[in-house]
Image (cartoon, rainbow, N blue to C red):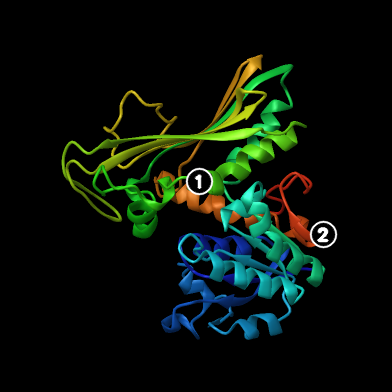
């Protein structure tokens, strides 16, 4: 019997989630929620970029989605700029007895520190509804939970686990994230939301703590570090103009310390032009996620990203969507509450090889 699924939003990740739901024979798309009133009443297929109808019409009425009684909602709405609204949507669905897989808010991947208190509402809602909530994607997500923990399974001794994102965001067409959240294209003395004290830890501290938990230990403290470089000329990217002298390169680290030593590191090296910061770490291919496990032996694993359209950012968006879509069967069967990758069995692309 197919698992009945409703999709939530048709943005960069949402579109790929709809396509991914349609690709799995064990999932049935039964509903679609959209925020844009112009999309209401339109078929999910064309809204997702498909050349055919899927027989599901979009609504902006949450109660209509709840009335469908789906087994799971794939929540792919932007939450970075509407955190509490997104949390409220999750609670409403969970209390209605609907399992939810979502790409955000990202701190719910594995809440730690101050985020534990912020997660209480959705956790209790899931328990009250007798259902599960799973937050994941590519980063935070697969690239820094299952992938590094899998690599450590072939280690004899571990000195440090480092998870890296090495990407050029020039084709990532999401102006709010690129310019407002990350600060690209802004004056060098402007400190964007992402780099305000504690925000990096709020967003990716979950990664550091989850890896530690997977290795049977705990992080004592997390140290934040970042550096930026300016553009040497004016140029265009998909989400806007980067003026000469404004931010064009960003590198940050979260350094998880155990007994005073850095043991687990989350690092991002982000450019909006390939020529920026040539001495910073470079990606394999056009873009990649890299896991470096130092110890005995030393391991480096590169997960290269490349969509069939030739774009690495397309692959990243699809990876985010498919990580949560492919997890639906496991999440539906999971214990009620907020679950992490550590709690779930191995998630695979079951059913995706053509018959």
| Quarter of the image that includes the C terminus | bottom right
Give the CA separation, mark 2 to mark 1. 35 Å
Q: Is residue 225 left or right of residue 121?
A: left
Residue displayed at 65% across by 16% down: 295
Q: Is residue 226 above or below residue 79?
A: above
| Residue at image mark 2 | 333
What is the secondary structure assignment of the residue under circle 2? Answer: helix
Q: Residue at the spot x=22%, y=39% of the render?
A: 231
- Residue 8 shows in this picture: yes
Location of residue 32 in the rendering, given as x and y in whole percent from the top left corner: 58, 76
Q: Tell me the residue at 57%/58% (across/down).
A: 105
Disc number for residue 213:
none
Badge 2: residue crowd in 10 Å (few <14, some 14–19, many ≥20): few
Q: Is residue 165 left or right of residue 336?
A: left
The x and y percentages for residue 110 are: 67, 48
Q: Is residue 198 above or below residue 97?
A: above
Depth check, front residue: 45 or 128: 128
* Classed neighbour count for the residue bearing mark 1: other residues with Cα under 10 Å, few (<14), some (14–19), many (≥20): few
Helix, strand or loop status at disc 1: loop
Which one is in front, 313 or 342?
342
Observer-nearest of 127 and 261: 261
Q: First in sequence: mark 2 or mark 1?
A: 1
Q: Does residue 40 lie above or below 14 as drawn?
A: below
Residue at 34% of width from left, 58% of height from top? Answer: 175
Count of number-bearing discs: 2
- Residue 73, picture quadrant: bottom right
Position in image of residue 71 (x %, y %): 75, 71
Q: Which residue is mark 1?
A: 198
In the rendered structure, the answer to whether residue 272 lies left or right of residue 261 reads left
Q: In which quadrant of the rendered image does the N terminus lie?
A: bottom right
């Amino acid at each position: 019997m197919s698992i009945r699924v409703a999709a939530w939003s048709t943005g960069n990740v949402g579109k790929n989630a709809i396509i991914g739901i349609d690709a799995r024979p064990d999932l049935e798309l039964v509903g679609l929620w959209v925020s844009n009133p112009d999309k209401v009443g339109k078929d999910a297929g064309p809204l997702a970029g498909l050349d055919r109808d899927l027989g599901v019409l979009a609504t902006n009425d949450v109660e209509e989605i709840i009335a469908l009684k789906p087994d799971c909602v794939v929540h792919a709405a932007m939450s970075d700029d509407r955190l509490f609204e997104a949390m409220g949507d999750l609670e409403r669905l969970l209390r209605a007895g609907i399992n939810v897989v979502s790409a955000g808010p990202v701190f719910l991947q594995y809440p730690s520190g101050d985020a534990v208190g912020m997660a209480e509402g959705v956790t209790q809602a899931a328990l009250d509804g007798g259902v599960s909530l799973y937050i994941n994607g590519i980063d935070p997500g697969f690239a820094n939970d299952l992938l590094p923990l899998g690599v450590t399974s072939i280690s004899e001794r571990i000195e440090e686990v480092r998870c890296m994102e090495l990407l050029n965001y020039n084709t990532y067409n999401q102006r709010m994230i690129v310019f407002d959240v990350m600060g690209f294209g802004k004056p060098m003395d402007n400190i964007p939301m992402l780099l305000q004290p504690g925000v990096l830890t709020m967003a990716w501290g979950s990664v550091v703590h989850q890896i530690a938990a997977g290795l049977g230990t705990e992080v004592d403290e997390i140290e934040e570090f970042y550096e930026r470089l300016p553009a040497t000329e004016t140029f265009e990217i998909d989400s806007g103009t980067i003026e000469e002298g404004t931010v064009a390169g960003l590198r940050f680290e979260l350094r998880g310390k155990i007994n005073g030593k850095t043991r687990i590191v989350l690092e991002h090296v982000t450019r909006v032009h390939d020529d920026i910061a040539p001495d910073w770490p470079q990606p394999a291919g056009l873009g990649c996620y890299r896991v470096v496990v130092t110890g005995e032996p030393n391991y480096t694993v590169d997960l290269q990203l490349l969509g069939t359209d030739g774009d690495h950012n397309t692959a990243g968006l699809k990876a985010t969507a498919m990580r949560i879509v492919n997890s639906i069967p496991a999440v539906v069967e999971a214990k009620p509450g907020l679950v992490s990758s550590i709690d779930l069995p191995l998630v695979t692309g079951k059913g995706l090889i053509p018959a």
